Image (tube, helix red, strand yellow):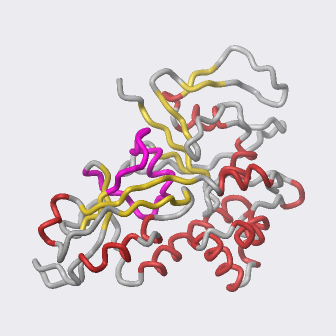
Amino acid sequence: MANDREVLREVWDGRLPIKFSIAEEDRELLLMEKDPYYILVPRMTYLPLLPVKKHFESAIPVTDSSDNQPTELWFSYQDVPLKWQIPIGVLYDLVGGDTLPWEIKLRISDFPADKLARLGTTIEETVRSSFIHNVKEAGYMKHRGAVMMHLLPDQHTQLWRGLHRDKFDDFWKINHRLMEHIDNAPYRCVPFRIYTGIHDRYIQKFFKPMTEDEKLTTLGQLLKQFKPEAVVELEETDDPDIIKSYEVAEGWKVKIHGIETPMNTPIQWLSEHLSHADNFLYIVVVKISS
């Protein structure tokens, strides 16, 4: 079970400063001009949960003049539509670069239905449903859902509210159970998703945190199996518990929560301590532009 509280707290407290403004293409549709909105947000949260709509609400028409349907809001960065299901920190690691505050555009027209899923009118409930689905999926991967199935509906709600309201203690009071080892064994497999681009399909496969001869598997081994071009194998390793040692290949970046994580870090430890709130370990692997 994750027991390094300082690490968990540091990950939870990760923040990004963001500047939201209406996209130039949509300014003529506004009812009035509105100043940009600056906010410091948790990397763990999701775009639709931020109070951005409230700030711009008085300037946004209720319906789309082209089809008289409710105005549908969406976000973009440098003309790239941002998926609301992906945690904000992962989005930034994928496309945000190194410039802060991160300048995101709020769009109110030309919804890209081929790239984004619709939120509908019950926005918070839609995000909550997606989040809980991920938590259940991760729980099944770790221990066949043996822990998740015993959580009560009120505990599901506390888990969600802990994330939504940025309450570390409330969240981890429930989530620590989802990080437990059953019979002191490592997870059945590690819930991970490798992202190489916002609109590329993420990689999610079966990967055990320990070999049959009880050697720890590492981030480098995971990437060697599922994204081999991003890592290189080293000739020697100083750790007797690790089979092979790896480093990031030239021209690539690998980040977890914005951190360029050492390749020899055990994947079990990463899953327990650096997973996002939905219990998935999000690994961003991107090619560096030359």
Q: Position of residue 99 (x, y in %)?
A: 41, 41
- State whether residue 134 is above or below residue 129: above
Q: Quadrant of residue 277?
A: bottom right
Q: Nearer the viewer, residue 32 or 140?
A: 32
Residue 142 x %, y %: 71, 59
Q: Nearer the viewer, residue 161 or 129?
A: 161
Residue 259, relative to residue 82: is it above or below? above
The residue at 54%/50% (across/down) is 193
Q: Picture coordinates of residue 261 (x, y %)?
A: 63, 36
* Residue 92 is one of the magenta-drawn residues: yes
Drawn side of residue 241 relative to residue 264, left or right: right
**The quarter of the displayed image where residue 71 is located:** bottom left
The residue sitting at 51% across, 43% down in the picture is: 284
Specify the segment rendered in magenta.
Answer: 79-104
Q: Is residue 5 magenta?
A: no
What residue sits 47% from the left and 71% below the top?
49
- Please give the count of numbered marks on the rendered protein: 0
Q: Horizontal placement of 47 versus 214: left or right?
A: left
Quarter of the picture containing the C terminus is: top left
Q: Looking at the image, which residue is at 47% across and 28% down?
A: 252
Task: Specify the farthest residue to the top.
Answer: 235
Q: Quadrant of the N terminus?
A: bottom right
